[in-house]
Structures are given as structure tokens and as C-alpha cells.
Image (cartoon, helix red, strand yellow):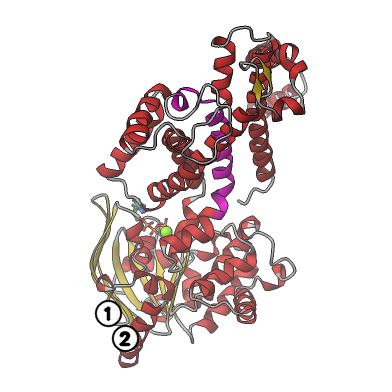
Amino acid sequence: MHKTTLEKANSAESMFSVSALNVKNKKTQKLYSVLFLMMTLLLILPVLVILGTLIVKGGSMISIDFLFTDPVNGMTEGGVFPALLGTVWLVSLALLVSVPLGIAAAIYLSEYASDNWFTRIINLAIINLAGVPSIVHALFGLGAFVMFFGFGTSILAASLTLAIMTLPVVIVSTRESLQAVPHAFREACWNMGATRWQTIRRVVLPNAVSGILTGVILEVSRTTGETAPIMFTGAAFFLPFLPQGIFDQTMALSLHLFVVSTQVPNVPEALPYAVALVLIGMVLLMNSVSIALRMYLRGQKKW
Amino acid sequence: MVEKTVVDTEFDRVVKAQKCKIEVNDLTISYAGKAALSDVSLKIYENEIFGIIGPANAGKTSFLKSLNLMNTFDANMKVEGDIRFNNRDIHQLRNVYALRSRIGVVFPLPVGLPLTIYENVALSPRLRGIKDKTSLDQIVERCLQRAALWDEVKDRLNSLGSLLSGGQQQRLTIARALSQEPEVLMLDEFSIAVDPVTTMRIEDVLKELKHEMTIILVTNLVQQAHRLADRTAFFLDGKCIEIGDTEALFNGEVKDPLTLDYIEGRFG
Ligand SMILES: Nc1ncnc2c1ncn2[C@@H]1O[C@H](COP(=O)(O)OP(=O)(O)OP(=O)(O)O)[C@@H](O)[C@H]1O
Ligand SMILES: [Mg+2]
């Protein structure tokens, strides 16, 4: 009895004193936090170096004119307008196809499908599709859209190839956003006699839409940089005119970068850097929109 | 909505002929092969409060779930036996949604949907096709009043229901169940997250409500069953040990001494 009171007094006292062990723990703690901070800094180093190099070497060429004029003189001078426009065309058309399809598939998989062998095979297929290298997608697009469906090398064929490529990622990210909505909400709705679709429309989708949007925008930024899939299917080396419709070929930023840095003689040193800067600028812009959206929506937590 | 009216008339015809609201025969419920409730047969009459008491693991929640066909949400859950709602076998229903919309449920853990308080209560009327703003306003106010929540939220009907306190969310859940204008209201330990004063207020409301609907009240508080229930069933380890008039049971007129032991708190 006496002893336990004493121990209690001791332990109460220990909150206000510092033992050797405490000091050591504190030091280790500090050491690790610094170590991890260093690793994090190391991680952003490449980003800074890349951006820095591009800005130093190509920044001087960037201007409104550069963005909105055609390349001239065997692509050694002028701007990147057709390539910029082409990339916008390709990416938008690709998303127009992959986003509705992907979201529909994700809703089916997350909200309707029961867990059976069929669903498992579909999931497996999606995971594998996401892992297929882009050059394989390129060859598939060439075989399927350019040749089999007879679209020729065109914006349509290239966009569809990109769409197939982005589809699994759209599905996975959408499904994750849907699953992030707690199951209890669905059951509460079903218990009121709501059908699956009523539940999805009124409760699940409105609360998943932020995540879905973020995923889609990130996907845009990834698609923007793809080169291989469009090279065989619709993107051209150089075109003296702008595409008039989806059956025309188009230039694209990513391919243009490849071309001016490896294929064209007598290119001024700054040009490839400037093209790369435009490309990265586009991607960063999309990413910032996505991050801003995420931050905005995180501030609106609903449960 | 068209389907619903068809079922309506059929149901209504049967209701008039019979006073028995829910009847189960040889009801057996199992999860992944493990029995949670076995061979329960009982009747629940219209406009009564039917209490179910029993210790944890007795199968009370499972019983409620089966009445509402919630086993369709859980591939593990198997329900065997007869369940009759308004004298008709619910396993032969073509329109599960109509059945569920006639049964309001309140589970122990409150679920405020991530909608505004107003929309939480207006959702079920909207699903039934009510669009008129004044009707919706009326329903929302009446249901929140009855669930003893109106005074606390009437000035912020447009804030999120999922961010209310636990006890408030529970009352919101009750309001939502009432907004279904159900024929049967199932309450599973509704007072777990609600303070004693509010519990009393809700209990008073339940006494009123039984003139309009049938209430099944699962409770851990035997005294709550005593205060409210007309008849009470005692469940133990997946079996229905006894069903009887509440007053009689609490006066010690039991067939199985276990019931009295439980009522008087001698085990559990
Ligand atoms: N979703 C489920 N999956 C698997 N087993 C379950 C599930 N729900 C309940 N059970 C099992 O069924 C049995 C009865 O559970 P039930 O929830 O019906 O009891 P209860 O009487 O409501 O208990 P309590 O008073 O603690 O709420 C328990 O053994 C439980 O483990
Ligand atoms: Mg329970």
C-alpha cells in the first residue's frame, strides 16, 4: 500500500524531470526527422534542376509569338502553334472518349458488380491494361484504328489510341473515389427504398465527384506528354497547314520536341528547350489546377 | 413509382382483412454458415410496440435485418423460413424497394447522410416523387419535430447532416425514417447515442406514433421495453426464448426462468 503510493509519487515527479533515456530518445527523434527531410529535398532536386535548365536555356525564346506562330525554315525558326493546337485536339478527343466510358465502367464495377469470377477477370484485365507499355498501345492503335477500322493516320486514330491507354487509369481512380464514400451511406439509402441508381445519383456521385475530377485532370497531364502512341497513329513530323477535321493528321508537342531535338539539322540550341518548356508548362498548369481543386475540396469535408 | 401503386392496392386489401402486420415462421439466419438465429416464429400485430430484449449476440439485429431484406446487401447472410408482411410472403415480392420504403429503420450507429439536414429528411419523399416545395417543407418540419430535433436545427436546415453531433444524427436518422411514412418502424437500440432527457422525449413520441404504425423496438435497456412495449420477446443466443405481454413478464409471469433472470439483471 505504502509502496504503490510512493511509486505513484515517483512517476508523477518523472513528468517534470528529464532522464538520460529521454535525452537519447529526443536526439534519435531529431536525427530521423532531419534524415527524412533530406531525402524529401533530394526528391524535388531533379524537378528543380530540370525546370531550371529549361528556363535558363530556353526561357529566352518563350513569348506569345512563339506560342501562336507556325514553325518556319525547316522548323529551325518560328513558333509551335500547330503542335500546341494538335496536342490540345488529341488530348481533348481522347478524354471525350475515355472519361465517359471509364466512369461508367467504374460505376458498374464499384456499385453494381458482385464479387464473382467475372468481375475478378475484369479487374485483372484493367490492371494489366494499365501496365501495357505505351509502344504496345501504339502498335495496337496502328493495327486497330489506322488499318482495321480504316481511319488512316489521323487525329481520330491517335485520340482513340490515347483513350484506350488512359481508360484503365480513369477506371481505377474513379473507382477509388467511389469507394471512398462510406458504405453506410449506401445502406441507409437502400433501407429507405432507394434503388441503386437513385443512391448513386443522390448520395454517392455528388460526394465522389471531386475525386473523380482530380483523377481526370491528372490523367490529362499524363496524356499530354505521350509520344509513342501518337507517332504511328496520327501525329505528323511537320505539316504546313492546320488540321481541318478529325480525319486529318496533326502535329503534337511531344513529337515536335523529339523531332527538333534529334531529327532536324541546324536547330538553334535554345529551341528544343523552349519546346520542352511549353510542354512542361502545360502539364504543370493542369497539375496545379488539380492540386488547387483538391485543396478546395478537402476544405469541404462532408463527414 | 408506378409499380408502387400497384403493390399498394394489393397490400391495402389484405391489411383490412388481417390485423397481423408481420409474421415469421421458422426463421433461421446464418452468416457464412454460422447460425445467428434459429427457428424463430412470432407474430407482430398492427399498431403495437413489439419489444425485443436480450443480451449481445442474441440475434436481435439480424432479425430486424431479415424483415427488411437487408440480406441482399451481404452475400454472407442467409435467411431461411417464412416472413410475411401484411400477410404476404416477402420473398415473393417483385418490388423490394416498395417494401423497404414501408419499413423505417434506425440502427444503433447513426448515419447522417452527407446532405443538408433538410435534404436528409426530404430525400425519401423526393424518391416517392414529391417535388412540391411546400409539401416537402411540411414533411421536413413535422418529421424533425417528432424526432425532437426541430428546435435545435430549424435555423440551420442547410448545414450538413453528417456533421451534427452523434445524438443529433441519431434523431436525424429517426426523422428520416419517419419521412418514409412507414407502416413499420424498426428501432435498434436507438437510445445508445442519445442523452436521457431526449430519450424520454422520443419515447413519448413513440407512444403517439404507435397509433399510426407498428413499432419494433430492440433495446438493451429492459426498463425501456417495460415503459414502451405492449408485448416483449426475449432472445438469447439465437433463440427466441419467450414472448409475452410486457406487463405480465415484468410481473414475473414467465414460462422460462431465464427470462426473469435477464429482466431482473441476474445475468448478461
Ligand atoms: N455482418 C455479419 N457478418 C458475420 N456475422 C455477423 C454479422 N452480423 C452479425 N453477425 C453474427 O451474428 C450473431 C448475432 O448478431 P446480432 O448483431 O444479430 O446480435 P444482437 O443481438 O443484435 O447483439 P447486440 O445486442 O450486441 O447488438 C453474432 O454472433 C454475430 O457475430
Ligand atoms: Mg444489435
Q: Quadrant of residue B63?
A: bottom left
Tell me if mark 1 has few (under 14), some (14-19) or many (20+) residues whose alpha carbon lies within 10 angstroms of its own.
Answer: some
How far, Cα to Cα, is label 2 from label 1?
A: 10 Å
Residue placed furthest toward the bottom = B17
Which chain does the residue under circle 2 lie in? B
Q: Quadrant of residue B45?
A: bottom left
Residue matched to label 2: B10
Q: Position of residue B113 (x, y in %)?
A: 56, 59
Q: Quadrant of ligand 1?
A: bottom left
What kind of secondary structure does the magenta stretch mostly adopt? helix
In the rendered image, residue A202 lying in the magenta stretch gets the answer no
In the rendered image, residue A209 lying in the magenta stretch gets the answer yes
Name the residue rendered at 36%, 35% in the picture: A145
Q: Amino acid at mark 1?
A: Arg
Q: Which residues are magenta?
A: A206-231
Q: Amino acid at mark 2?
A: Glu
Residue matched to label 1: B88
**Foreground of the two, A62 or B143:** A62
**Foreground of the two, A159 or B227:** A159
